[in-house]
């Protein structure tokens, strides 16, 4: 790694991140189309910072490696030096990575999140005017998803069908937990996975969502869960989240669980009056929705959702489903954050699409908007605003890459690099 001589490390103090004017930012270009979208993204981010701060601030890029490029150079899919760079310099950005097939690391993205304990997957979802959408009112979609990033079935505690360890595990289960073992329909041919959901993991995710809702003056926080079936994991997530909202923030939040308690004691009219008084007094509503109903209602009642806090698998489904409503994952940004340590990795949310690699044609929007999220994480909101304004203007002009062009009448198709050029021109003017 070539450490930029003029750059400085981002540090952490009691008040949060301490960001110098020339922070060193590790980056991974990514595999496949990652090379194309990184070239456009780097230029757009540099232009935004230059336009906003007239040379007083600058992002100092430091290349690191993972995925195919790391395998070719270092015979490792995820070198230790890359993780150490992300840990030492705190804030990083990456393109899409190939997950090795047939062994090795289960997922490079999941591995990075778990090694750095990046427990929040932050996925803002909003519509840019003019972007083709399959829904009638995509403008109603303006949500921010807080997806727990380190637990649930993504923990990787699985046993493969037919393996000796699997049979040992099932034997222990049969001996010590016969009632639960009896619920395994075909034990001799089953793979088994564990789904850990902890109070600590749930509440630190919820705290991040509640703090965000307060800081950004949002309307509500919805807990999405499948607690009607998985009562001691997803149901516990819901209960622990409500506990935090009710006991950790004074009167800043009002929960549906409070409403339910009041209804049982004094009736529905009293509960409605109590909720109205709290909301009128400035409290933010905290409610919950069963996951399958939520996936329906984000389509039919998108205006009812604002901030969403959810477990890992639910968040995976929801974030991609919502992205489809506003143009697809080609323009959906993502960040993985540990608010306690300040570590964060921002990333394109789509795959590597190798058949389009090095053709300068794919949409760089996902990585560019992830970079916009990174700038806000640094506190460089003026530069981030320039990117959003430019993206709005260029897409509204119907000048888009092939993925949007094929769905928009009267649009002009441009290359990946040309789309970046248009954003830069808007910011400079």
Image (cartoon, rainbow, N blue to C red):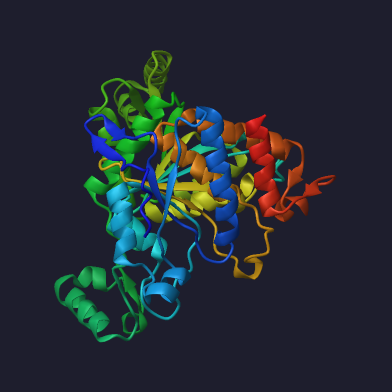
Decide which of 173, 299 is in the foreground and name it. Answer: 299
The spot of residue 115 in percent (x, y) is 28, 58
Q: Residue 165 is drawn in which quadrant?
A: bottom left
Decide which of 240, 50 is in the foreground and name it. Answer: 50
Quadrant of the image containing the N terminus? bottom left
Asked whether the viewer can see residue 224, the reply is no
From the viewer's perspective, is residue 141 above or below residue 407?
Answer: above
The spot of residue 138 in percent (x, y) is 65, 39
Side of 213 where 354 appears, left or right: right
The residue under the point 60% across, 58% down is 36
The residue under the point 40% across, 37% down is 377
Decide which of 201, 31 is in the foreground and name it. Answer: 31
Q: Residue furthest right?
A: 410
The spot of residue 392 in percent (x, y) is 66, 35
Side of 409 where 130 appears, left or right: left
From the viewer's perspective, is residue 102 above or below residue 17?
Answer: below
From the viewer's perspective, is residue 286 above or below residue 339?
Answer: above
Q: Residue 274 is drawn in which quadrant?
A: top left
The residue under the point 44% across, 33% down is 57
The spot of residue 238 in percent (x, y) is 33, 43
Q: Residue furthest front?
A: 5
């Amino acid at each position: 790694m070539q450490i930029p001589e003029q750059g400085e490390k981002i540090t952490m103090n009691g008040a949060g991140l301490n960001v110098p004017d020339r922070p060193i930012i590790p980056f991974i270009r990514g595999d496949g189309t990652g090379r194309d979208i990184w070239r456009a993204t780097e230029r757009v981010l540099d232009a935004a910072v230059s336009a906003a701060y007239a040379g007083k601030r600058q992002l100092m890029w430091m290349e690191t490696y993972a995925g195919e490029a790391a395998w070719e150079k270092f015979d490792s899919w995820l070198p230790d030096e890359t993780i150490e760079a992300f840990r030492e310099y705190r804030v990083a950005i990456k393109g899409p990575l190939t997950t090795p097939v047939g062994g090795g690391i289960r997922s490079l993205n999941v591995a990075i999140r778990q090694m750095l304990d990046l427990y929040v997957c932050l996925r803002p979802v909003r519509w840019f005017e003019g972007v083709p959408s399959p829904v009638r009112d995509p403008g109603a979609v303006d949500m921010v998803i807080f997806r727990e990033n380190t637990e649930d079935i993504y923990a990787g505690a699985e046993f493969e069908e037919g393996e000796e360890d699997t049979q040992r595990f099932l034997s222990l289960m049969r001996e010590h937990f016969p009632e639960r073992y009896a619920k395994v329909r075909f034990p001799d041919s089953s793979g088994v996975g564990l789904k850990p959901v902890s109070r600590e993991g749930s509440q630190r995710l919820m705290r991040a969502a509640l703090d965000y809702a307060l800081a950004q003056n949002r309307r509500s926080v919805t807990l999405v869960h499948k607690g009607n079936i998985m009562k001691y994991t997803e149901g516990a997530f819901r209960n622990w989240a409500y506990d935090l909202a009710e006991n950790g923030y004074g009167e800043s939040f009002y929960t549906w669980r409070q409403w339910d308690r009041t209804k049982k004691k004094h009736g529905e009219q009293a509960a409605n009056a109590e909720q109205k008084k709290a909301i009128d007094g400035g409290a933010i509503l905290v409610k919950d929705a069963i996951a399958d109903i939520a996936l329906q209602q984000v389509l039919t009642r998108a205006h009812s959702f604002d901030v969403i806090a959810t477990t890992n698998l639910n968040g995976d489904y929801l974030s991609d489903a919502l992205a489809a409503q506003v143009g697809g994952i080609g323009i959906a940004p993502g960040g993985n954050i540990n608010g306690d340590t300040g570590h964060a990795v921002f990333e394109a949310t789509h795959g590597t699409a190798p058949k389009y690699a090095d053709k300068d044609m794919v949409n760089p929007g996902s990585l560019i908007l992830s970079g916009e999220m990174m700038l806000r994480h640094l506190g460089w909101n003026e530069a981030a605003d320039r990117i959003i304004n430019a993206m709005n203007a260029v897409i509204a002009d119907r000048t888009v890459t092939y993925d949007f062009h094929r769905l928009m009448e009267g649009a002009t198709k441009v290359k990946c690099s040309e789309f970046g050029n248009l954003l830069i021109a808007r910011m400079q003017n």
